[in-house]
């Protein structure tokens, strides 16, 4: 009777199984306390889709490994691009194409229009004529007194000014390379010299804001002057 009172209608062994312990019950299965819920981060992002180390959605393997490899490659390429840009931004240091050691103590330098000759005025009043392709001085004039402050050329003329005067030369491509053409006194050294294209006038800008305009004598016949030197080609017909 006591056994029947403890488990009326129960089959043998049924009292070892409690009603609340029915297999499949959500209250007794491991982890069913959060069944139907997803773990969340403080920011409200599901942890199974969030990588706290990378702060971006977590990818399943092997995609995370591939993503890391690709990002490393991209960063390497970007570093090379930045390095190339830095090299482009840096000024390129080019060595001088030619050095003229004979043109020393120069105060001013001017080159011919064709770039074949370089004229330098020195502190001693010399005008050095240097041949660019030869890289050497080929002639110097000593007719000036005082430092040569300004040199300017235009066409067949070259003007050089000191503190007291300006000299104009007929520039040639053969010896003597510079032939005296005109000479004018000046009250002081000019700031700039400008020769007219036709070779008839010379303008000198003075420190007193004055501009002196000087009339130049006509050049001798080019063929006659070259013929006298004997090194010029015959005139074209």
Image (cartoon, rainbow, N blue to C red):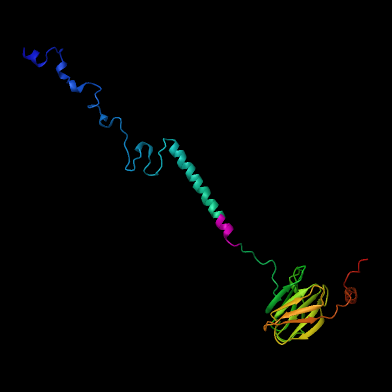
Q: Is residue 2 magenta?
A: no
Q: Position of residue 68 (x, y in %)?
A: 45, 42
Q: Position of residue 51 (x, y in %)?
A: 38, 41
Residue beneath the point at 77% across and 79% down: 202
| Left or right of 15, for residue 144 | right
Q: Nearer the viewer, residue 204 or 136?
A: 204
Quarter of the figure that contains the N terminus: top left
Q: Is residue 176 above or below residue 113?
A: below
Any part of residue 152 in sight: yes
Quadrant including the C terminus: bottom right
In the image, 55 versus 203, the foreground residue is 203
Q: Which residue is outermost to the right? A: 237
> What is the tally of numbered marks visible in this picture?
0
The residue at the point 44 percent across, 39 percent down is 65
Examine the structure image and report whether residue 89 is included in the region drawn in magenta.
yes
Please provide the residue range marked out in magenta: 85-91
- Residue 186 lies, with reference to residue 66, above or below; the image says below
Identify the main secondary structure in magenta. helix
119 vs 11, left or right, is right
Q: Residue at x 75, y 79 (%)?
A: 203
State whether residue 18 is above or below residue 207: above
| 183 sits left or right of 43 in the view | right
Q: Quadrant of residue 113?
A: bottom right
When asked about the image quadrant of residue 138, the answer is bottom right
**Outermost front residue:** 210
Visible residue check, residue 104: no
- Relative placement, left or right, of 130 versus 15 is right
The x, y position of residue 81, in whole percent, is: 55, 51
Please identify the quarter of the rendering in which residue 193 is found: bottom right
Q: Residue extending furthest left?
A: 1
In this view of the protein, which residue sits in the foreground, 32 or 73?
A: 32
Residue 159 location, x and y as percent? 76, 78
């Amino acid at each position: 009777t006591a056994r029947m009172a403890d488990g009326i209608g129960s089959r043998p062994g049924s009292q070892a199984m409690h009603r609340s312990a029915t297999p499949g019950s959500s209250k007794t299965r491991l982890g069913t306390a959060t069944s139907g819920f997803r773990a969340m981060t403080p920011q409200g992002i599901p942890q199974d889709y969030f990588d706290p180390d990378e702060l971006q959605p977590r990818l399943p393997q092997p995609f995370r490994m591939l993503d890391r490899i690709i990002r490393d490659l991209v960063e390497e390429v970007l570093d090379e691009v930045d390095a190339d840009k830095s090299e482009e931004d840096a000024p390129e240091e080019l060595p001088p194409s030619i050095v003229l050691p004979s043109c020393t103590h120069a105060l001013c330098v001017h080159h011919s229009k064709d770039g074949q000759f370089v004229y330098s005025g020195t502190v001693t009043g010399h005008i050095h004529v240097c041949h660019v392709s030869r890289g050497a001085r080929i002639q110097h004039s000593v007719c000036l007194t005082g430092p040569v402050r300004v040199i300017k050329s235009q066409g067949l003329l070259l003007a050089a000014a000191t503190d007291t005067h300006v000299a104009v030369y007929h520039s040639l491509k053969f010896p003597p390379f510079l032939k005296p053409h005109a000479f004018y006194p000046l009250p002081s050294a000019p700031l700039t010299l400008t020769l007219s294209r036709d070779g008839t006038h010379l303008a000198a800008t003075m420190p007193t804001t004055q501009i002196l305009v000087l009339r130049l004598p006509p050049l001798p016949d080019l063929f006659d002057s070259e013929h006298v030197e004997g090194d010029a080609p015959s005139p074209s017909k």
